[in-house]
Image (spheres, grey):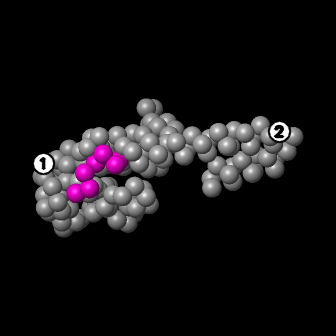
Amino acid sequence: VYVRNIANAIVDADPDNAAAYREREAAYVAELQKLDEEVRATIAGIPQESRVLIVYHDAFQYFSAEYGLELAATVLPGNPSQQASAAAVAEIIEIVAGRQVGAVYREPQFAADAIESIAEEAGVRVLTLYSAAFTDEVDTYIKLMRANADALVEGLGGG
């Protein structure tokens, strides 16, 4: 939808080059479809019982549903600029231990204190998932999706 809307706006602004823009739109949509298949294949290697996701904030609902993951807990279900309560952290530690979660996931744009405390207490690793922020290494949507799929396999098993 985003690609089509962007292409439509560009074509409206520069109709003389519409054919070239439509060609690029089609190529990028095909690349995104291939990426989706790649991510699905990567995540398919994670054992079903291990597809339990603990993340910093509530940015992965759609991703989880789309790719067959259970979003078991978020450190901050509301505003990510708030602090996690001690009770919330303790509850998540119990979930991690009880569900035998292999890793918890932070996002690079947020402080990692709470998620690191959970990981240390539960004896699991902290890995990174990208939502709305890029880094020098992950600077495109396609790289973001691949990095996320790889981090999920690394933390939850499979591959």
Q: Which residues are magenta?
A: 43-49
The picture places residue 126, in percent across and down from the top left corner, at 24, 45
Indicate whether residue 86 is drawn in magenta: no
Amino acid type, residue under disc 2 in the picture: Asn
Residue 35 appears left or right of 104: right
- Mark sitting earlier along the chain (2/1): 2
The nearer-to-camera label among 2 and 1 is 2
Density class for disc 1 (Cα within 10 Å; few <14, some 14-19, many ≥20) is: some
Residue shown at the point (32%, 55%) measured from the top left: 56
The picture places residue 52, in percent across and down from the top left corner, at 26, 57
Q: Residue furthest top?
A: 137
Residue 138 appears left or right of 68: right
Q: Is residue 97 above or below residue 110?
A: below
Q: Is residue 70 above or below residue 30?
A: below
The picture places residue 147, in percent across and down from the top left corner, at 39, 39
- Image quadrant holding the C terminus, namely top left
Density class for disc 2 (Cα within 10 Å; few <14, some 14-19, many ≥20) is: few
- Image quadrant holding the N terminus, namely bottom right
Residue shown at the point (26%, 43%) measured from the top left: 158
Indicate whether residue 47 is drawn in magenta: yes
Of residues 100 and 49, the one drawn nearer to the viewer in this rendering: 49
Mark 2 secondary-structure assignment: helix
Which corner quadrant of the image does residue 127 belong to?
top left
The picture places residue 69, in percent across and down from the top left corner, at 33, 58
Amino acid type, residue under disc 1 in the picture: Gly
Residue shown at the point (46%, 37%) measured from the top left: 143
* Residue at mark 2: 17
* Residue at mark 1: 123
